[in-house]
Image: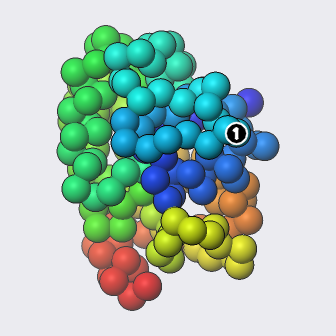
């Protein structure tokens, strides 16, 4: 079973944790600012140093699902808290930034990079029940995994170039 580590438990992170738990193994969830729901409290961490390193290192993919202004901090936190071992893949859920934003993780850990952004706004009080699309931009080797994630969310996926990504984001 494909394993995921979620970095962030805001609106999108909470949605992904809920939708993916049936089809994927959620190794852990890290967010220093949120209280976990009862459903994830056993795999939830508020202090990055308390996360067993193997939960992150052994994840097939790390999904950074934080606010746009916190992505740089999340990247720095991962670089400074992890041993210099290979990470398989990292995706972020920002509509504003391309996968290139994750380049420091590629340089430091050799991780494949992608952006996986919902084509809608999550308001935090209810999860979408209607079909919607995710935009994918980044390493093409990650597209099949992104397709599986979208399917688990009962959603579609659109492959985008870096140049198309911002247009896709502002059109929603």
Do we see residue 171 in this rendering? Answer: yes
Find residue 73 and report its horizontal and vertical position in percent: 22, 40
Left or right of 139? Residue 59 is right
Position of 151 relative to 36 (above/below):
below
* Quadrant assignment for the N terminus: top right
Position of 114 relative to 126 (above/below):
above
Position of 109 relative to 113 (above/below):
above
Q: Which residue is mark 1?
A: 39
Density class for disc 1 (Cα within 10 Å; few <14, some 14-19, many ≥20) is few
Q: Nearer the viewer, residue 33 or 128?
A: 33
Q: Residue at x 37, y 24 (%)?
A: 47
Quarter of the image for residue 160 reads: bottom left
Q: Looking at this view, name the residue that lies furthest to the right.
A: 22
Find residue 43 and report its horizontal and vertical position in percent: 60, 27
Q: Residue at x 50, y 72 (%)?
A: 123
Left or right of 75? Residue 17 is right
Q: Residue at x 53, y 19 (%)?
A: 55
Q: Nearer the viewer, residue 20 or 103?
A: 20
């Amino acid at each position: 079973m494909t394993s995921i580590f979620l970095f962030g438990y805001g609106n999108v992170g909470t949605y992904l944790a809920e939708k993916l738990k049936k089809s994927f193994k959620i190794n852990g969830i890290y967010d220093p600012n949120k209280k976990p729901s009862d459903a994830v409290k056993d795999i939830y961490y508020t202090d990055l140093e308390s996360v067993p390193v193997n939960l992150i290192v052994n994840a097939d993919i790390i999904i950074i699902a934080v606010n746009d202004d916190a992505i740089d901090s999340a990247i720095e936190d991962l670089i400074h808290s992890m041993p210099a071992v290979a990470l398989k893949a990292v995706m972020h859920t920002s509509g504003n930034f391309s996968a290139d934003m994750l380049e420091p993780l590629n340089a430091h850990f050799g991780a494949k990079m992608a952006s996986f952004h919902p084509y809608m706004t999550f308001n935090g009080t209810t999860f979408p029940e209607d079909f919607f699309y995710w935009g994918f931009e980044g390493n093409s080797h990650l597209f099949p995994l992104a397709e599986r994630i979208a399917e688990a969310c009962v959603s579609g996926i659109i492959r985008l170039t870096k140049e198309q990504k911002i247009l896709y984001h502002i059109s929603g």
